Amino acid sequence: MTAPVAVITGATGGIGAVLARRLAADGWLLHLVDVDAGRLESLRQVLPGGTTIAESRLEEPAACATALQDAPDRFGALVHLAGIFVPHDLGPGSREIYDQTMQHNASNAFDLAGVVLPRMTDGGRIVLTSSLGFHRGVPDHAAYSMAKGAIVGLTRALARRIGNRGICVNAVAPGIIETRMADDLIERRGRDALLSAIPLGRLGQPEDVAGVIAFLLPGDASYITGQVITVDGGIINA
Ligand SMILES: NC(=O)c1ccc[n+]([C@@H]2O[C@H](COP(=O)([O-])OP(=O)(O)OC[C@H]3O[C@@H](n4cnc5c(N)ncnc54)[C@H](O)[C@@H]3O)[C@@H](O)[C@H]2O)c1
């Protein structure tokens, strides 16, 4: 029997690289997508043979189709982690960053879903990435907060649309996770100030998010769909 195929976007990021190792250990065959060719190749070298990679900037439908054209058929899972987090002001001068943020964080999820679903096995899983930034709003990242809210809407719409194929669609909403993406935030706000707002008393690690994503894939979590699972050390609700 061949291994099921999981597509991971943003695969060389902090969360993506840890997830790739975890899913490979769990027996998944991986197709990894990211803009960074060098990091993709390095990651492939530490993963089992059969891992395929695609260097691609996912920002319009054609790019999403191209990124998946060399992936093995058929998909058991899509984990869409690709995203950017760029501070910006309000007003016309910020429109370019706004457009990029929406494309890299939200529009590409819509485009990817259209490409992936015809190739997904019944009973497959889609995991999209929202954020604590959606729940609380990030003052100097309005576009990011909007985009991560759009992910929640897409998650719920897809869950209703394809539940009849046994496909579960969920989102994870990480809190503050120690990856490149959070470096600038941690520096500007200060580690101690951030820690004081986290009931578990530590920043999140990529493994904290990867473990939840792995749980949402086939094998477990067969009756969970349309949900946003917050992985934030208790910031929102505790
Ligand atoms: N780190 C955090 O604190 C945090 C908090 C909330 C949500 N998230 C979300 O988790 C996801 C993963 O973030 P991370 O912390 O691993 O960040 P990261 O910056 O380490 O990784 C993001 C990866 O996405 C890739 N990428 C960005 N835009 C892309 C595009 N259009 N096409 C292809 N690849 C693209 C980057 O090259 C990078 O490898 C993101 O969606 C992010 O918004 C992270």
Image (cartoon, rainbow, N blue to C red):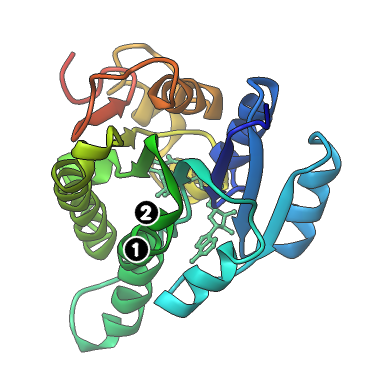
From the viewer's perspective, tell me whether residue 4 is left or right of residue 201.
right
Image coordinates for residue 151, horizontal then vertical, percent: 24, 51
User: Alpha-carbon neighbours of circle 2 within 10 Å: few (<14), some, or many (≥20)?
Assistant: many
Image coordinates for residue 213, horizontal then vertical, percent: 44, 28
Q: Nearer the viewer, residue 35 or 24?
A: 24
Q: Quadrant of the N terminus?
A: top right
Image coordinates for residue 231, horizontal then vertical, percent: 34, 25
Instruction: Give SS at disc 2.
Output: helix
- The residue singled out by tag 1 in the image is 114
- The residue singled out by tag 2 in the image is 117
Q: Mark 1: which amino acid?
A: Gly
Q: Nearer the viewer, residue 34 or 114?
A: 114
User: Alpha-carbon neighbours of circle 1 within 10 Å: few (<14), some, or many (≥20)?
Assistant: some
Q: Is residue 133 above or below residue 191?
A: below
Q: Mark 2: which amino acid?
A: Leu
Farthest residue toward the bottom? 92
Farthest residue toward the front? 1
From the viewer's perspective, tell me whether residue 189 is left or right of residue 162.
right
Image coordinates for residue 97, horizontal then vertical, percent: 35, 76
Can residue 30 be seen at all in this image of the molecule? yes
